[in-house]
Image (spheres, coloured by chain):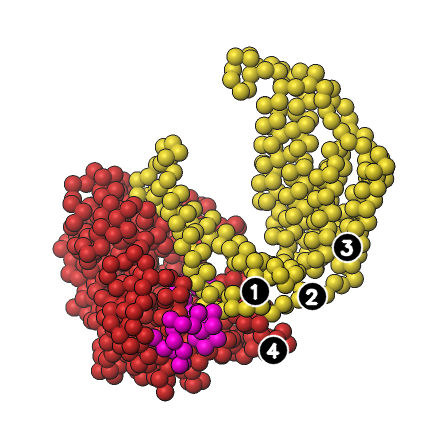
Chain colours: A red, B yellow
Amino acid sequence: MAIATLTHLTYWYPGASTPALNDACLATEDGLTVVAGPSGSGKSTLLRVFNGLVPHFHGGRFAGRADVMGMSVSETPTRKLARTVGFVFQDPELQTVYNAVDREVAFGLENIGLPRREIAGRVDEALHAAGVERLAGRAVRTLSGGERQRVALASALAMRPRLVVLDEPTSQLDPGGAEIVLEATMRIVDDGRSVIVSEHRLDQLLHSATRLVLVEGGIVRTADPASWRPPAASHRLPRASAPGGEAWSLERVSAGFDRYLVLDGIDLAGRSGEVVALSGPNGGGKTTLLRLIAGSLAPLAGKVLRRPGRVAYLPQNPTALLHRPTVRAEVCLTLDRARDPEPPEAILTQLGLQSVADHYPRDLSCGEQQRAALAAVLPGTPSLVLLDEPTRGIDASARSALATLVGRLRDRGAAVVLATHDTDLRSAVADRVLEVRNGKVTEMQLEVTRV
Amino acid sequence: MNARAVAAWSAACLVIVLSTTNPAYKALVLVAALAALATGVGIRRIRGPLFAVLLVAAFASLVNFVSAHLGSTVLFELPERIPAIGGPYTLEALAFGASGGITIAAAILSAAPFSLLLASHEVMDALPPALSRTGVAIAASLNLVPAVATSFVQVTEAQRLRGWRPRGPRSWMEVVVPVVLSSVEGSIQLAESMEARGFGSGPRTAVESTSLQRSDWMLVAASGLALMAFAVSHAAGWAADWFPYPMVSLPAMDPRPMAACVLLFAPVLVWRSRH
């Protein structure tokens, strides 16, 4: 049965001259539909068509036709489609209304005026379907990212939707969190619901997918999920020279907040021309360790030493950096401050940002914003490079470009520290992998590398 | 703990604090609010908010002391030629400023149980159905407040490491702009999420708050009685007003309005710690 049909659908965001979706024709059936494509290609826009957020919430021009479960999207408001289509967004923190798990799951049911006596049963059913019954009664703020995202999934399922749409639900999660969300997604498909999911971690989903939709530059086409292969992972980059002297070190360092010790008595050092990757679960202390090395967090005990020179720091949230009118202006700001003669085009080209160099960075897609933030901190010749989840939301080709750029900085003598869950990036550039967990740092075996 | 009972107590505190000029009664309400918060939230958890409230109150007191050069008890003088702050500094201005500071602190702490003690959904459930949708929207936006605070720290750190240094008000634009934009984007994302879950599609289910328990009824009764007793005291002239100019004097204290204020200590008896 056709769940959703797009017929020559073209959509322009307000004020845009080029369409975000261009003459899209598509018919999705029951089962699992996977949406793939590079960042900024129009995947999120396509997904928002299925519950009417495009065009009802975002405005803009909408040509052609879209039908979901027999309802015309352009004629049915999102709040009505919400009874049929559940939607889970990327960021689990920005879709929470209440702070109590049960009430959060009940929010949609209250909105549609479900009788009070039915709400408790529906909440229990949804928590069970998402595999988070044990979280009932918990405060949302005490949950991990993976748990929060599964509560968001339960909130969508409470409405008993026929179709569930997930927009990169694991992009902000560590591998453990991502695994539990993907397992819950597969369980929904097994329960007989239709699911449309946009995701960068495709391995687990493709073998169960009934349909694959590829989006690139607003063009939508379908492919056979059995024969399609995602872009190849980055190759191990050869190094030009051996690592140099010590560039940073931590001696018996402890750090934490509000009497909660995040790192406890850490001894660690990194050399110039060396890439150190930090892995470990969300909340394990990777960001705290990066902030210590950067000098933006004072240790509770111990000593942090850094070789003098410019520090390039990419925070976990790229929008913390972006405030200039164009991507190029962001790059120029850093180069001017560092008095570095390198032209901005160099890094814009390396990160594939030429086409959006004169765009307002906050208008870009999540993946493009991440690359813009990388371009804003990495131009020139920093001596210490600290990147917090640099591949968040970016596609395989951008990841490959980042690996090349990191390799180049390393060869110029920069000491690089990456906090990343991305095994491809680690295997492409890391000289050492350290696991940060429960306040301790342990050396890990370097992943098998591809040469 | 029922949000409607808490509202009754907060309203009684606020009405008394704002209806009298006598700092003795205001101070009594302030102590009652502090005791209630210490009981329900715990001393350790209110230290931060308390410090912020005291800072605001101290600032308000200071502003009056520095700007109102009235009264007969001169403590010291600054030359008149100094713009804005020159002139006599009086005990009366200091006393009046302190009274204003107590008013501010008592008012804030009387309303504090809504944020420190109750979950947002408990407050929303206590609203009448006509206000339900607005209440939910406000509760959802309040959820973004911690995110804004975190964003401020993140942006300041990131911009510092990128070479930014605070040099005058204009330089703060590099921090303020990303924080404000991130907040707006977060609000839009939240609104999108609420819309996708049917918000605004029609009348909402009125999820009633838990019914009033015996302890809640006791609190409502004590608050109502306090309010009535203070109103009667005021009308009868027992709760005398206080004005420090032209010469400061101790505020008059009468046992009847004081007894009314003491009733506001009821939460100490009926609340249990929620943390």
Query: Residue tagged by mark 4?
Result: A118
Q: Amino acid at mark 2?
A: Thr
**Are circles 2 and 4 on residues that touch, CB within 8 Å?**
no
> Which corner quadrant of the image does residue B68 belong to?
top right
Neighbor class of circle 2 (other Cα within 10 Å; few <14, some 14-19, many 20+) is few
Instruction: Name the N-terminal-most of marks 1 and 4.
Output: 1
Please provide percent x and percent y for residue A317. 36, 54
- Residue, x 56% and y 75% (percent of image)? A123
Magenta segment boundaries in residue numbering: A66-95
- Residue, x 83% and y 38% (percent of image)? B235
Dot 1 lies on which element?
Answer: loop
Horizontal relation, residue A393 to residue B227: left or right = left
Q: Chain of mark 1?
A: A
Q: Which residue is at the far left?
A: A240
Q: Is residue A9 above or below residue B116?
A: below
Query: Residue tagged by mark 1?
Result: A100
Q: Is residue A170 magenta?
A: no
Query: Residue tagged by mark 2?
Result: B210
Q: Chain of mark 2?
A: B
